[in-house]
Amino acid sequence: MQQEDGWAMQLLAVTCLSLAAKMEETLVPSLLDLQAESTRYIFEPQTILRMELLILTALNWRLRSVTPFTFIDFFACKVDPRGKHTRYLIARATQIILAALHDIKFLDHCPSTMAAAAVLCATGETPTLPFVNPSLAVNWCIGLAEEGVSSCYKLMQPLLSGKRANTAEAVNLCSDETPFSNSSSCTTPPPPKRRKRSPPVT
């Protein structure tokens, strides 16, 4: 990189830092505070704002990578509003999605559809939760289609033969929270009774 182009790279770095702060922070620092005092160039706020528009236009305003994991927590709360099985649903749906990544057929489905289908599969494995069909799942989020969720749900069925016990161990839940752990694994056995020693014979 040539020395005269150093200001451009510094402007790009400051602008990206400003965009990241706006995406993640609740209290965004001022544009002047984002620039270190030891830097060679100090840019005016209007210059940084114009650079932000250039970057946003180049990225088509897509600053966040949307994956199925973006929707899992939200969909799990839709199925279990009380939160009794939410941890298990999230862990099991995550396990199903990770297994689905190895199959090229799932590339035809958008991230929200995969997340909805995975949560439906996890719900079907939880006897204490009511069954949710794809026609009801489409109400969870705008953009979900019953045909897409149903198709993805059917593709995930062969993936459900994995070891479900590993999921229960991963979330470390008791029997009233997961359908695959028995009550004996969640209760502490009583301490053994001590034998009374007979008095010494004199």
Image (cartoon, rainbow, N blue to C red):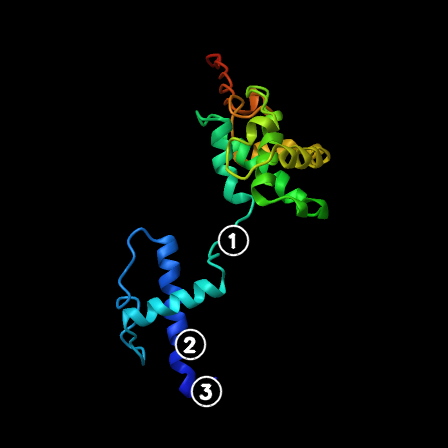
Label 1 and label 2: CA atoms lie apart by 24 Å
Vertical comparison of 135 with 98: above or below: above
Residue 114 screen position, x and y as percent: 61, 40
Which residue is pictured at 38% across the width and 53% down the height?
A: 24
Q: Secondary structure at mark 3?
A: loop
Q: Is residue 122 left or right of residue 194?
A: right
Kindly indicate the quadrant of the structure image that contains residue 153: top right
Please name the residue that numbered disc 1 is placed on: 65
The answer to whether residue 193 of the structure is visible from this angle is yes
Label 3 and label 1: CA atoms lie apart by 32 Å
Residue 155 screen position, x and y as percent: 71, 37
Q: Nearer the viewer, residue 130 or 107?
A: 107
Please name the residue that numbered disc 2 is placed on: 9
Q: Nearer the viewer, residue 129 or 4?
A: 4
Crowd tier of the residue under label 3, counting other residues whose Cα lies within 10 Å: few below 14, some 14–19, many 20 or above: few
Residue 141 bears which disc, if any? none
Which of pointers 3 and 1 lies earlier in the amino acid sequence?
3
Please name the residue that numbered disc 3 is placed on: 2
Q: Secondary structure at mark 2?
A: helix
Residue 73 screen position, x and y as percent: 49, 37
Residue 45 screen position, x and y as percent: 28, 69
The amino acid beneath tag 1 is Ser
The amino acid beneath tag 3 is Gln
User: Marks 2 and 3: in contact by CB < 8 Å?
Assistant: no
Q: Secondary structure at mark 1?
A: loop
Crowd tier of the residue under label 2, counting other residues whose Cα lies within 10 Å: few below 14, some 14–19, many 20 or above: few
Vertical comparison of 64 with 92: above or below: below
Vertical comparison of 70 with 74: above or below: below
The amino acid beneath tag 2 is Met
Label 3 and label 2: CA atoms lie apart by 11 Å
Kindly indicate the quadrant of the structure image that contains residue 110: top right
